[in-house]
Image (spheres, rainbow, N blue to C red):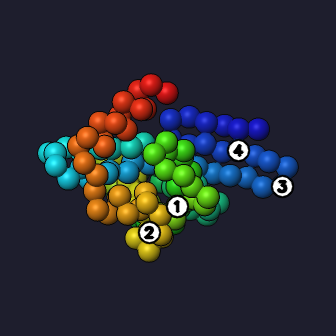
Amino acid sequence: MAVIDQDFCVIKYPDHVDRFIRCVLIQKVNDHCEDLEYGFWVSLSEKSFKDYLENFDNENHETQYFGWLCNYIPQYKFSNSVPTTVVTKSGNDRPEIFPHQDFDHPFVKDYYEGITKEEAEKRIQGMLKN
């Protein structure tokens, strides 16, 4: 069974439950004045998910959680999920995620080094086609 809305997703299996929240990842675009903003799902532990859910309407709630990036990103191949830090923001904006810099993967490298405007445009066009 699964329950999903704009901000939360819970998938119940016979032997476990997966919990996800909607977050934002801001990808630096090196040769442009705007960055590329992704909306991603991140899995959280039961404890972190409950804390986030309980404080969802609290405009002053600021904290950090450990989470796993759980999205398909066409430009990358993943054999494992990417570990992230999920940072909540005051004002009820969606949390921002930061991949762990020590995780060896091209996605993490691109996050910290930035991508070109041409690459950002290719990604946007690819998403619009899907």
Q: Position of residue 44 (x, y in %)?
A: 58, 58
* C-alpha span from label 1 to label 4: 20 Å
Residue 10 visible, this angle: yes
Residue position for label 4: 11
Q: Position of residue 118 (x, y in %)?
A: 26, 40
Q: Are marks 4 and 2 in contact (CB under 8 Å)?
A: no
Total numbered labels: 4
Please, what secondary structure does the residue beneath circle 3 have? Answer: loop
Please, what secondary structure does the residue beneath circle 2 have? Answer: loop
Between disc 4 and disc 2, the foreground one is: 2
* C-alpha span from label 2 to label 3: 29 Å
Residue position for label 1: 82
* C-alpha span from label 1 to label 2: 8 Å
Please, what secondary structure does the residue beneath circle 4 have? Answer: strand
Which residue is found at the position 68% from the left and 52% from the top?
18
Q: Are marks 1 and 2 in contact (CB under 8 Å)?
A: yes
* C-alpha span from label 4 to label 2: 25 Å
In primary-sequence order, the first of circles 1 and 4 is 4
In the picture, the quarter occupied by the N terminus is top right
Residue position for label 3: 15
- Side (left or right) of 63 relative to 120: right
| Residue type indicated by callout 3 | Asp
In primary-sequence order, the first of circles 2 and 3 is 3
| Residue type indicated by callout 1 | Val
Which residue is found at the position 30% from the left and 42% from the top?
120
In primary-sequence order, the first of circles 4 and 2 is 4
Q: Which mark is residue 100?
A: 2
| Residue type indicated by callout 2 | His
Q: Which mark is residue 63?
A: none
The residue carrying pointer 3 sits among few (fewer than 14), some (14 to 19) or many (20 or more) residues within 10 Å by Cα, namely: few
Which residue is found at the position 47% from the left and 64% from the top?
105
